[in-house]
Image (cartoon, rainbow, N blue to C red):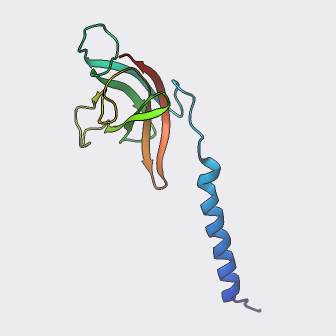
Amino acid sequence: MKIRKLTPTGAVLGGAALVVSLALAPAALAGKRPPTGGSGGGSSITGPVLVTDVNGNGVANFGDTVTFNESTTATSQPYVNVLCYQNGVLVMNSWNGFFDQALNPTRNFALYSPSWHSGAASCTAWLDMYTRRGTAQLASVNFQVGA
């Protein structure tokens, strides 16, 4: 019986192919998000839910504080990421853990930032989880913030 040894050249080439295929995998998956406002894989997010309503009108406005209702079977440590834009410019990017051991136990988002001084904005809240490759979006909801 003849035993065949893997040559160093073959090992290097095989390793290079593996590295290239692993490097291309995230690019192939990039940009694939679940439908806005829906749920994916046992995950959902709804809201915003007003925590403080500064002007008392019952809808989210600049300066109010909101939270979200979320549900997921994908992870025991979900995060919510709120992104708000004014005229296509990102003015708020805020994260909160929605689990008991999270750093911010309130799970609230104040609708203002150093880049957002006033006015209406278009926002999206993403329900996310951390993976070995970074974050994965599980579900999202779009909402408008009034001036």
Residue 42 horizontal/vertical position (percent): 50, 32
Q: Is residue 52 above or below residue 13?
A: above
Looking at the image, which residue is at 59% across and 53% down? 26
Q: Is residue 130 left or right of residue 34?
A: left
Residue 6 can be seen in this image: no
- Decide which of 21, 122 is in the foreground and name it: 122
Q: Is residue 124 above or below residue 49?
A: below
Q: Is residue 20 above or below residue 119?
A: below
Residue 41 horizontal/vertical position (percent): 53, 34
Dividing the picture into quadrants, the one containing residue 70 is top left
Dividing the picture into quadrants, the one containing residue 102 is top left
Q: Is residue 73 left or right of residue 12?
A: left
Looking at the image, which residue is at 53% across and 25% down? 38
The quadrant of the image that shows the N terminus is: bottom right
- Decide which of 4, 85 is in the foreground and name it: 85
The quadrant of the image that shows the C terminus is: top left
Residue 13 horizontal/vertical position (percent): 69, 78
Residue 127 can be seen in this image: yes
Looking at the image, which residue is at 54% across and 32% down? 40
Q: Is residue 131 left or right of residue 95?
A: right
Q: Is residue 11 left or right of residue 147?
A: right
Looking at the image, which residue is at 34% across and 39% down? 95
Q: Give the residue furthest to the right.
A: 1
Q: Give the residue furthest to the bottom.
A: 2
For the image, the number of numbered tags is 0
Q: Is residue 38 above or below residue 81?
A: above
